[in-house]
Amino acid sequence: MSTSEILFWFLSVLALFSAIMVLVSKNPVHSVLWLIVVFFAISGHYLLLNAQFLAIVNIIVYAGAIMVLFLFVIMLMNLNKGTEPQKNIWMIFSGVISGGLLLWIFISASISAGDIVGKNALLKDGDIGLIQNLGKVLFSEYALPFEISSVLFLSAMVGAVVIGKKN
Amino acid sequence: MPIQYYIALASCLFCIGVAGVLIRRNAIIVFMCIELMLNAVNLLLVAFSKMHYANAVTSDAKTIVGTDAQLFVFFIMVVAAAEVSVGLAIIVMMYRNIHSVDINFLNRLKN
């Protein structure tokens, strides 16, 4: 077993365990911290696939900005007491069953599809994930979507201010 | 690494997110589970990008096949950041009005 395989299994187990801990934590602050662990594990997967730009953007944007926003809102609302109201056991049961059925469908449909049998994802090698290549394509072929996404950010900012304003 | 492993991992993460949306009542946790689903899709896009690159690089060493998928991941992150800012503003406003984030009380848009 090579080093990258050991890293793959370690990061996969870490991501799945932390994702389950996001669901079962009573305290919303603990859920946010477990979700940050999930994002770091996924960034590790990106590094393993040599997508270094996405790995660092994932850490900066998700773990750095979005999760801080979540923590800020949770602490602003003073929700960190584990105030989950009345739990319906049948609702939990049916939710887990539906998620499991969806997983079953995904796995059984994809595991034997003819297009992917015997294909490998290239670990460690390949320079398409480096910032030089991505930047070239982003600012030539995808220049218009890039500019449109800045308008999207502007409208989201204006929308957040308008919604959050006290009237 | 076989692509099936990545498909299984991303499917598991996505379905954990779906189950979380279905079983949790706290609106913020539901929102975090949506982020988890988005990340599962991102991971699968990057894995498929490297799969197509591995196929193309055997015939052409200078190919940039697979760059599009990684840029799609970048745009998904952009849209997710915008979505989170607006969504959290809506949750804060609802908490200010009804003093709860239980989605059982949020099941109607009126009042």
Image (cartoon, rainbow, N blue to C red):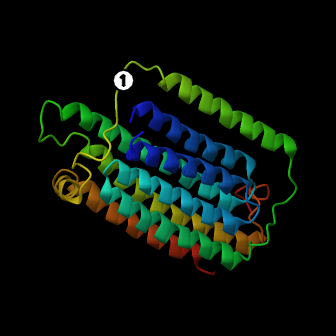
Residue closest to the eye, A154 or B75: B75
Measured along the vertical axis of the image, is residue A74 above or below residue B28? below
Q: Nearer the viewer, residue B92 or A121?
A: A121
Q: Nearer the viewer, residue A124 or A37?
A: A124
Quadrant of the image containing the N terminus of chain B: top left
- Residue B108, relative to residue A66: is it above or below? above
Q: Residue furthest front?
A: A1
Q: Is residue A38 left or right of residue A122?
A: right
Residue A41's x, y, as percent? 49, 55
- The C terminus of chain B lies in which quarter of the figure? bottom right
Quarter occupied by residue B94: bottom right
Residue B9, percent from left and from top: 52, 40
Residue occupied by mark 1: A118
Q: Nearer the viewer, residue B18 or B56?
A: B56
Q: Position of residue A119 (x, y in %)?
A: 34, 27
Q: Which residue shows up at 20% across the image and 33% down it? A: B56
Give the left or right position of residue A67, taking residue B77 as reference: right
Q: How many marks?
A: 1
Q: Name the kind of residue labelled 1 in the image.
A: Gly
Residue found at x 20% / y 58%: A135
Q: Indicate the position of residue A127 as horizontal and vertical percent values.
A: 21, 49
Asked if A124 appears above or below B56 in the picture, the reply is below
Which residue shows up at 57% across the image and 39% down it? B12
Q: Residue at x 16, y 56 (%)?
A: A136
Image check: A9 left or right of A122? right
What is the chain identity of the residue bearing mark 1? Answer: A
| Quarter occupied by residue A85 | bottom right
Most distant residue in the bottom direction: A166
Q: Tag 1, which secondary structure?
A: loop
